[in-house]
Image (tube, rainbow, N blue to C red):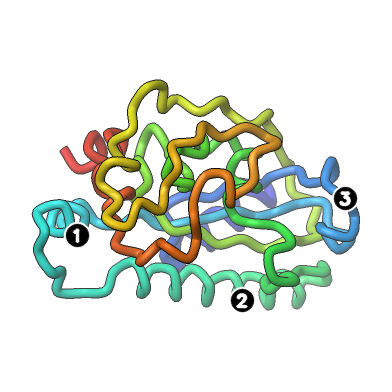
Amino acid sequence: MELNEIWEHRIKDSGADFVYFVDITMLPADITEGCSCAVLFGKTLSREYISTLKAGQEPKRKEVFNTEHKMDALAVKLADWLETEGYKSIAKLKMGSLSHKTVALRAGLGFIGKNNLLVTSQYGCALMMGKVLTTAPFITMSEMPKEPQCGDCNICVDVCPNKALLGKTWSVTTTRDEIMVRKLCILCLKCMVWCPYTAEYIK
């Protein structure tokens, strides 16, 4: 069993639904802190939770917060595991230095939508991610970021109660502030649950 397979099983056994081993050598060294691989993993939000939000009801659990916390905790655990194997591994980077979405784009997991979220064909926007940068010799992959597939769709823009989304189509040169007004976002998650790709996921 090769190294990737061993660790993928271990990460999934710890609660993740998917795992990618991503080449990050094309990124600036001050961002990657000397690591060549990003282990990206994540967990999907339940269809029941998304459906409850879409119906305008209050979910029984704070699933977004809880899942995000679990993925953060798994990142710390994974970094510790890899460190004990002798590989430099980093779970907590400098604030904003390398986002999960940037790594996810290189993994080919999805594209950035007009809601500024990662949109995947399999799960829509209904996923929370974690990552660890490491020097472990995993077999890595890297893809060019996918072009947005939103087209003329503006559902997320239209459902945003505070008009935080500006309707801008993402590109590699687009900043977050061109897509959304952060101070207006109230984390209501409407842009997540009403995305057509998320709607396909919960069917």
Q: Which mark is residue 49?
A: 1
Q: Which residue is mark 3?
A: 28
Total marks placed:
3
- Give the residue displayed 28% in from the left and 36% down from the top: 155
- Give the residue displayed 75% in from the left and 71% down from the top: 94
Helix, strand or loop for disc 2: helix
Residue density around tag 3, few if under 14, some if 14–19, many if 20 or more, within 10 Å: few
The quadrant in which residue 145 appears is top right
Tag in front: 1 or 2: 1
Residue type pointed to by label 1: Tyr
Helix, strand or loop for disc 1: helix
First along the sequence among labels 1 and 3: 3
* Whether residue 1 is visible: no
- Give the residue displayed 32% in from the left and 42% down from the top: 156
Tag in front: 3 or 2: 3
The quadrant in which residue 50 appears is bottom left
